[in-house]
């Protein structure tokens, strides 16, 4: 969440009666009760709004620095590789004509294979 989405906190709702989940979120994962939502659930049970504050860790700082560094490098490369266009002494280029696509003639053998076989006429005697 910190590195990918640059989130400051993560939040969730849990039923007030769900002591096992509250224990897991609070004691194991480090969430704290932020607020109580009265009649949050369809059966009118209250919910605890729990949040965990995310610290900007080393991974997040590195990610932010590398993004900024990459942007700076890209701008420098653009300036170095792409000369600024000048209109002095340049002639307009004519559009090049693209040749039409001409179908390749079939080989005689292929024509024979594709041609339908002629039916023989029966002679009546």
Image (cartoon, helix red, strand yellow):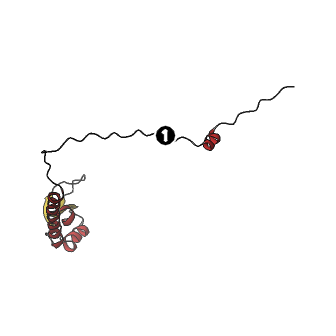
27 lies above or below 121: below
The answer to whether residue 120 is left or right of residue 6 is: right
Q: Nearer the viewer, residue 102 or 47?
A: 102
Q: In the shown orientation, is residue 99 left or right of residue 107?
A: left
Q: Residue 54, located in which quarter of the rendered image?
A: bottom left
Residue at the image position 43 percent from the left and 40 percent from the top: 101
62 or 21, which lies in front?
62
Instruction: Decide which of 115, 55 is in the foreground and name it.
Output: 115
Residue 119 falls in image quadrant: top right
Residue 125 on image: x %, y %: 87, 25
Q: Which residue is mark 1?
A: 103
At 61% from the left and 40% from the top, the residue drawn is: 111
- Residue 123 location in percent, x, y? 82, 27
Secondary structure, mark 1, is loop
Q: Quadrant of residue 53?
A: bottom left
Furthest residue to the top?
Answer: 125
On the image, the x and y values in percent for residue 78 come to 17, 57
Q: Residue furthest right?
A: 125
Residue, far front: 89
Asked if 58 appears above or below 82 in the picture, the reply is below
Which residue sits at x=41%, y=38%? 100
In the rendered structure, the answer to whether residue 78 lies left or right of residue 113 reads left
**Residue at 39 percent of width and 40 percent of height:** 99
């Amino acid at each position: 969440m910190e590195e990918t989405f640059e989130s400051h906190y993560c939040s969730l709702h849990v039923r007030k009666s769900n002591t096992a989940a509250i224990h897991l979120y609070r004691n194991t994962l480090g969430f704290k009760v932020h607020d109580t939502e009265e009649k949050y659930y369809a059966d009118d049970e209250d919910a605890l709004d729990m949040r965990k504050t995310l610290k900007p860790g080393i991974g997040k700082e590195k990610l932010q620095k590398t993004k900024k560094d990459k942007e700076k490098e890209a701008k420098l490369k653009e300036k170095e590789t792409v000369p600024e266009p000048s209109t002095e002494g340049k002639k307009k280029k004519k559009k090049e004509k693209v040749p039409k696509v001409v179908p390749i003639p079939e080989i005689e053998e292929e024509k024979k294979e594709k041609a339908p076989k002629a039916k023989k006429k029966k002679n009546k005697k």
